[in-house]
Image (spheres, rainbow, N blue to C red):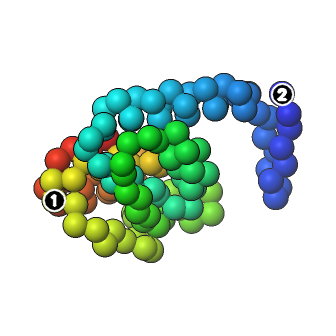
Amino acid sequence: MSNIKLDDKSFTSYISEEKINEVVNRVAALINADYKDKNPLFLVVLNGAFMFAADVLRGITTECQVSFVKLSSYTGTSSSGKVKELVGMNEDLENRHVVVLEDIVDSGTTIEYILADLATKKTASIA
């Protein structure tokens, strides 16, 4: 596998691009099946998930909409434990099927914040 250097950090990849693409395509196929004729709203969490979201959305064949939120719970490489909403949701989510596309979920702070927010908006389903 390859080594990647980002600023002062070094990483070794252990999942191949082929394997990642295979899983992303499987996720898109499952979403197509589960949300056929439901016009889901994909809620993409910026900045981290934008590439993942682009890859997933390339495989979506059902009618859908896309929106973005930008949240932050990190200072540098450490979680602050508190979520700051930098760009919020503007769509009416009542009776909508919402699919959250997020990148790495480690502490769970950001996804808990999103799910709590969506639960108050009377969404039809959250995935």
Circle 1 packing at 10 Å, graded few (<14), some (14-19), many (20+), is some
Label 1 vs label 2, nearer the camera: 1
Can residue 80 be seen in the rendering of this structure?
Answer: no
How far apart marks 1 and 2 lie (CA) works out to: 45 Å
Task: Tell me which residue sits at (47%, 35%) in the image.
Answer: 28
Up the image or down, 63 lies above or below 2; here it is below
- Label ID, residue 1: 2
Q: Quadrant of residue 89?
A: bottom left
Task: Tell me which residue sits at (61%, 26%) in the image.
Answer: 22
Q: Which label's residue is closer to the chain start, 1 or 2?
A: 2
Circle 2 packing at 10 Å, graded few (<14), some (14-19), many (20+), is few
Task: Tell me which residue sits at (45%, 56%) in the image.
Answer: 44
Image quadrant holding the N terminus, namely top right
Residue 51 appears at what percent x and percent y?
61, 51
Q: Quadrant of residue 88?
A: bottom left
Amino acid identity at mark 1 = Glu
Which residue bears the numbered disc 1?
Answer: 94
Residue 11 appears at what percent x and percent y?
78, 40
Say which of 92 and 104 sits in front. Answer: 92
Residue 20 appears at what percent x and percent y?
64, 31
- Label ID, residue 40: none
Quick one: SS at disc 1? Answer: loop
Give the left or right position of residue 2, taking residue 47 as reference. right
Pointer 1 with pointer 2, Cβ within 8 A: no
Amino acid identity at mark 2 = Met
Quick one: SS at disc 2? Answer: loop
Task: Tell me which residue sits at (46%, 67%) in the image.
Answer: 70
Up the image or down, 13 lies above or below 50; here it is above
